[in-house]
Image: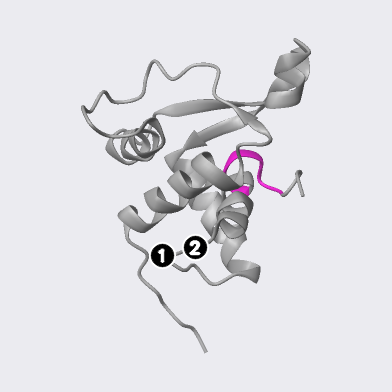
Amino acid sequence: MKVSVEIKDKDIIDAIVTALEGGSNHWYNLPDTSMVLKVKGVSLSERIGLTVFDDHEAEIPVNDLELVDEEDEDADLGVISYKNIQRGLDLFLVDHFFDPAMDAEDADTFLQLVVMGEVEFG
């Protein structure tokens, strides 16, 4: 049996916002957001999601917060990109149901799968 579920871009952007503003802020650092769309009155977190859906080639770098603080060269974790969102979604749906009202813990798991392709931080 195959089940298809439509997940709206807005729901994915909301999951990214939830992660960046709550569930994941203990491990990530955004070293360069210069490529993120400038939209007045919209948070950086939401603009990151809008950017990767607007420009499928955009890549927002993500670093390990702890290693950045230590100026470690291995701080790069990956990127938030349209391609990585697709990969993260595929990995997330193996063990989770994508709920548009996702809590911070699930949003954190989703973002880790997007950025790194695996869950590194508990």
The residue located at (77%, 49%) in the rendering is 122
Chief secondary structure of the magenta portion: helix
The residue located at (37%, 64%) in the rendering is 7
- The dot on residue 100 is 1
What colour scheme was applied to this rendering of the protein? one colour
User: Which residue is labeled 2 in the image?
Assistant: 102
* Range drawn in magenta: 113-118
Residue reaching furthest to the bottom? 1
Q: Position of residue 113 (x, y in %)?
A: 62, 49
Q: Position of residue 116 (x, y in %)?
A: 66, 40
Q: Badges 2 and 1: C-beta atoms under 8 Å apart?
A: yes
The residue located at (75%, 10%) in the rendering is 71
Helix, strand or loop at label 1? It is loop
Helix, strand or loop at label 2? It is loop
> Is residue 115 magenta-colored?
yes
Viewed as shown, does residue 104 lie left or right of 71?
A: left
* Amino acid type at mark 2: Met
> Residue 36 is drawn in which quadrant?
top left
